């Protein structure tokens, strides 16, 4: 593997910006200094007018392999992630078959080892009848990111609604427990009510069916379990102002036992966007009213929300009830009748999450230091990831170089997802990803990939 020297760049790390050089050797950051010279053989990269950030770590993606590979696979989506500056990902268990056994979980790790250009980890899945397999994961707590519980409806038998199983997982798991929180009984009641009132449901009904109360009730329940057993709980994709009262910012992140995540689409879209985007932005939990988006931003900036992720969840256009047009202003439109209930929930986002947040940096909404904190540092702290998430000597060289003055319009021509679409099509981001290093390997450079080296399995520093 080649060694690299990044020269004359602006480094963003641990709340600061500073000018300097970075020497990468044997997969790791060998040295950080104002001016580095070396007699060793290195490939020198000019970082003038660029910023170097720690690679993003996305703690919630759906890469669909095995079984749903018409939508995506680990190779295609990890490649898209790397092009977007995401150097590590944690992938969810709702594949086909779901990762409900140790054997199935390790099969996913083997696929990652063979095909993923980014560093990888995979969650153990939970159902109402695989408790023994879940608790076996305790023996792998140093090499599995966590246990995932769907406390709201999803595909197949992933909904966990048995109080006994929930109690047992929260009591017995030594890993971080990540939860999708929506109360199924509330959703069913809302759906029945609205179907009694109108003949045809629309995308704009989605946040009414999967409303604030459904999210709050489920998140509150998860927190009660976690407090009862002192579990390590991480609640995914918070979407409501009401839920934010459940989280605090009075202690250091490393000491929190209950943490939270917000996703880029809930920071960017609101329910007003259903009028133009329709089922493109149908996802669970739903994108909600503008007042919720405002509250999410406030909580992100004051540290009640700990990390930013994507919940990258690709579906083909037919599954979303959409077709492509020749209109650059509306490249995708809905077709047919009865689309809302048939349309699959989820958005493809991992390639553009960092660029989208850099848009908000340019808009003055958030600092670049805060973006790095929420997309890199804090994810590493939350999950206790070993030697990643920071630009530190001795750490793995997971780095992304960005040009903040090189805009890019998201379009079909530059989307790398297997599903080949994005709800952000036509949107111009003000920054470009120029280089991505994964474990010291230059995996991406100005639109070109070097696929000779794959990412590594993430390791976790848990006692």
Image: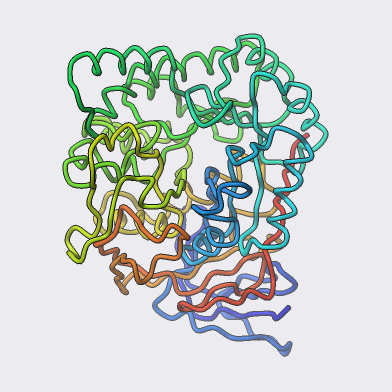
The answer to whether 47 appears left or right of 165 in the picture is left
The answer to whether 108 appears left or right of 251 in the picture is right
Hey, which residue is sitting farthest right in the picture?
Answer: 139
Residue 346: percent from left, percent from top: 41, 42
Residue 363: percent from left, percent from top: 24, 55
159 or 324, nearer to the observer: 324
Residue 191: name its quadrant: top left
For image coordinates 58% across by 26% down, the residue present is 157
- Colouring convention used in this rendered image of the protein: rainbow
Q: Is residue 349 above or below residue 136?
A: below
For image coordinates 70% across by 81% down, the residue present is 2
The answer to whether 210 appears left or right of 173 in the picture is left
Query: Count the marks: how many?
Result: 0
218 or 29, nearer to the observer: 218
For image coordinates 83% across by 34% down, the residue present is 139
Q: Is residue 171 above or below residue 442?
A: above
Q: Is residue 206 above or below residue 283?
A: above
Q: Is residue 309 visible?
A: no
Residue 381: name its quadrant: top right
134 or 240, nearer to the observer: 134
Q: Is residue 8 visible?
A: yes
């Amino acid at each position: 593997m080649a060694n690299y020297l990044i020269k004359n760049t602006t480094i963003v790390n641990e709340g600061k910006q500073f000018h300097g050089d970075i020497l990468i050797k044997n997969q790791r950051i060998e040295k950080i200094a104002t001016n580095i010279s070396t007699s060793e053989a290195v490939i020198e990269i000019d970082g003038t007018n660029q910023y170097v950030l720690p690679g993003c770590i996305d703690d919630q993606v759906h890469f669909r392999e095995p079984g749903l590979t018409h939508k995506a696979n680990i190779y295609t989506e990890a490649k898209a992630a790397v092009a977007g500056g995401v150097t590590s990902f944690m992938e969810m268990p709702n594949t086909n078959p779901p990762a409900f056994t140790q054997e199935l979980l390790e099969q996913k790790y083997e696929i990652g080892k063979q095909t993923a250009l980014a560093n990888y980890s995979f969650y153990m899945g939970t159902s109402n009848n695989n408790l023994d397999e879940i608790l076996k994961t305790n023996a792998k707590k140093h090499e599995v990111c966590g246990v995932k519980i769907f406390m709201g409806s999803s595909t197949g038998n992933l909904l966990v609604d048995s109080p006994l199983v929930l109690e047992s997982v929260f009591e017995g798991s030594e890993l971080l427990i990540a939860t999708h929180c929506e109360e199924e009984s509330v959703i069913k009641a809302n759906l029945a009510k609205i179907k009694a009132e109108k003949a045809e449901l629309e995308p704009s009904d989605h946040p009414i069916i999967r409303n604030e109360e459904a999210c709050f009730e489920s998140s509150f329940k998860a927190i009660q379990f976690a407090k009862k057993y002192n579990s390590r709980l991480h609640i995914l994709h918070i979407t409501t102002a009401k839920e934010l009262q459940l989280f605090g910012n009075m202690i250091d992140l490393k000491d929190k036992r209950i943490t939270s995540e917000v996703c880029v689409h809930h920071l960017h879209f609101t329910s007003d966007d259903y009028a133009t985007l329709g089922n493109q932005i149908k996802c669970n939990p739903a994108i909600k009213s503008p007042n919720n988006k405002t509250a999410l931003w406030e909580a992100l900036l004051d540290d009640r929300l700990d990390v930013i992720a994507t919940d990258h969840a690709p579906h083909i256009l037919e599954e979303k009830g959409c077709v492509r047009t020749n209109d650059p202003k509306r490249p995708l439109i809905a077709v047919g009748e009865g689309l809302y209930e048939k349309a699959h929930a989820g958005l493809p986002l991992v390639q553009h999450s960092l660029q989208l947040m850099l848009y908000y940096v340019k808009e003055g909404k958030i600092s670049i230091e805060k973006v790095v904190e929420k997309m890199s540092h804090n994810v590493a702290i939350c999950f206790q990831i070993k030697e990643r998430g920071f630009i530190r000597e001795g750490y793995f060289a997971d780095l992304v170089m960005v040009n903040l003055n090189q805009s890019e319009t998201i379009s079909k021509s530059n989307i790398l997802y297997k599903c080949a679409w994005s709800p952000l099509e036509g949107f111009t981001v003000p920054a470009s990803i120029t280089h991505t290093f994964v474990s010291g390997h230059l995996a991406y450079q100005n639109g070109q990939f070097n696929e000779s080296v794959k990412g590594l399995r993430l390791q976790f520093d848990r006692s």
